[in-house]
Image (spheres, grey):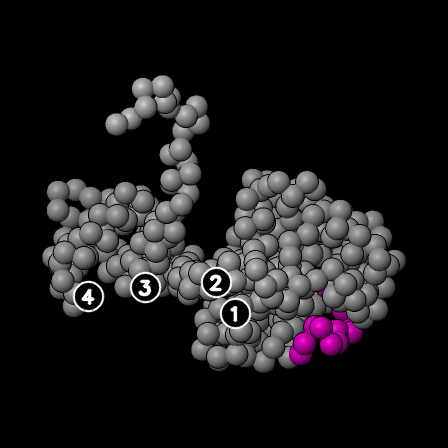
């Protein structure tokens, strides 16, 4: 029997309950994308029965999955027929210019890594082995290309490289930033500097660019050496993978290799100075706990301190609110 003196709590528990199972929503997206439901639907839509037949699966689970995607606003439903929402049509259909399915597939694999978060917290050590499989490494690079499209556009608009001649894209991945910057600035030559398997993927994207004759690749490890002959250097989503001391040494190598006068640009996801938000950089710091020895997300003041310790001057920060992204620029006199 309930206690008649017991009262309802003053705080609504629904946000807590929703947060506790939000991974279920992500898994519905992961599986629907892995099954390529959105590509199958894009032309004319389909019933659950028709989709099940196309996928070679039973109707019941396919109908359940598609209904969940309707609730997630990834699909629309009229009668028994399903169609892609505007969001899914733009980003989850293979062959479209902003296809992000490779990123969704990456997050699907990451789900299993995040299951080890408690172990990482208890041990303060990475619990996922470094990516050595050739296929996975290339898939990761393709996924990063999909997510870098918008940030590369912002970078080209907000950081003026019209006075610079040679850009070194350090840890440049698929070359998304180099391609965008070379296409925006006809004065600029760009070099994507990364591991061998990664620059193989970059070469595929570079070959499709109208600026391909001004973009090259260079194989190497930025933790060991930085090639010279450049008056601009970009480190996009690099510093969060390293500890503070490693970042100080990395930026000193960049400073020493950079021609003078030169510019360095860091693109990353800084939390606020109190480390109370935004949510993405703080959750992403846990991702670095799972995957790296010392990686973390760094505040604006910490990032500027890395740059100044290396010898750079005139540090400037461009925050892309509400996106959890910032560009840091600094000059070598």
Labels 1, 3: front one: 1
Mark 3 residue element: helix
Nearer the N terminus, badge 4 or badge 1?
4
Q: Is residue 28 above or below residue 169?
A: above
Contact (CB < 8 A) between labels 2 and 4? no
> Percent from the top left, x then y, of residue 173?
57, 68
Of all residues shown, which one is farthest toward the top? 5
Q: Which mark is residue 299?
A: none
The Cα–Cα distance between marks 2 and 4, rounded to whole angstroms, is 32 Å
Nearer the N terminus, badge 1 or badge 3?
3
Q: Which residue is mark 2?
A: 116
Q: Residues within 10 Å of mark 4 (few under 14, many from 20)?
A: some
Labels 3, 2: front one: 2
Nearer the N terminus, badge 2 or badge 1?
2
Closer to us: 165 or 7: 7
Mark 4 residue element: helix
The Cα–Cα distance between marks 4 and 3, rounded to whole angstroms, is 11 Å
Q: Which residue is mark 3?
A: 34
Closer to us: 168 or 295: 295
Residue at x 65% of width, y 43% of height: 275
Q: Which residue is mark 4?
A: 55
> Percent from the top left, x then y, of residue 327?
67, 50
**Residue 290, visible in the rendered structure:** yes
Q: Which mark is residue 128?
A: 1
């Amino acid at each position: 029997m309930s206690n008649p003196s017991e009262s309802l709590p003053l705080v609504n528990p629904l946000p807590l309950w929703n947060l506790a199972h939000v991974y279920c929503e992500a898994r519905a997206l992961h599986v629907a994308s892995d099954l390529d439901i959105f590509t199958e639907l894009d032309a004319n839509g389909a019933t659950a029965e028709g989709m099940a037949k196309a996928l070679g699966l039973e109707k019941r689970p396919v109908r359940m999955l598609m209904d969940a995607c309707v609730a997630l606003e990834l699909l629309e439903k009229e009668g028994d027929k399903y169609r892609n929402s505007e969001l899914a049509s733009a980003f989850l259909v293979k062959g479209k210019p902003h296809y992000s399915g490779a990123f969704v597939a990456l997050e699907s694999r990451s789900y299993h890594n995040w299951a080890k978060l408690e172990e990482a917290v208890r041990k303060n050590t990475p619990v996922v082995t470094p990516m050595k499989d050739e296929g996975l490494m290339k898939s990761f690079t393709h996924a990063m290309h999909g997510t870098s499209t918008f940030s590369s556009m912002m970078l080209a608009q907000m950081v003026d490289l019209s006075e610079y001649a040679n850009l070194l894209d350090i840890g440049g991945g698929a070359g998304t930033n180099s391609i965008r910057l070379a296409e925006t600035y006809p004065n600029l030559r760009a070099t994507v500097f990364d591991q061998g398997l990664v620059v193989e993927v970059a070469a595929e994207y570079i070959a499709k660019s109208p600026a391909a004759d001004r973009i090259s690749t260079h194989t190497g490890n930025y933790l060991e050496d930085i090639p010279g002959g450049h008056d601009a250097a970009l480190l996009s989503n690099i510093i969060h993978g390293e500890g503070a001391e490693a970042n100080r040494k990395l930026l000193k190598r960049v400073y020493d290799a950079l021609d003078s006068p030169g510019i360095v640009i860091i693109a990353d996801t800084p939390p606020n100075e109190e480390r109370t938000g935004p949510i993405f950089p703080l959750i992403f710091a846990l991702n670095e706990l799972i995957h790296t020895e010392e990686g973390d997300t760094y505040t604006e003041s910490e990032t500027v301190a890395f740059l100044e310790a290396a010898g750079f001057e005139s540090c400037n920060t461009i925050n892309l609110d509400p996106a959890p992204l910032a560009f840091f620029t600094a000059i070598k006199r």
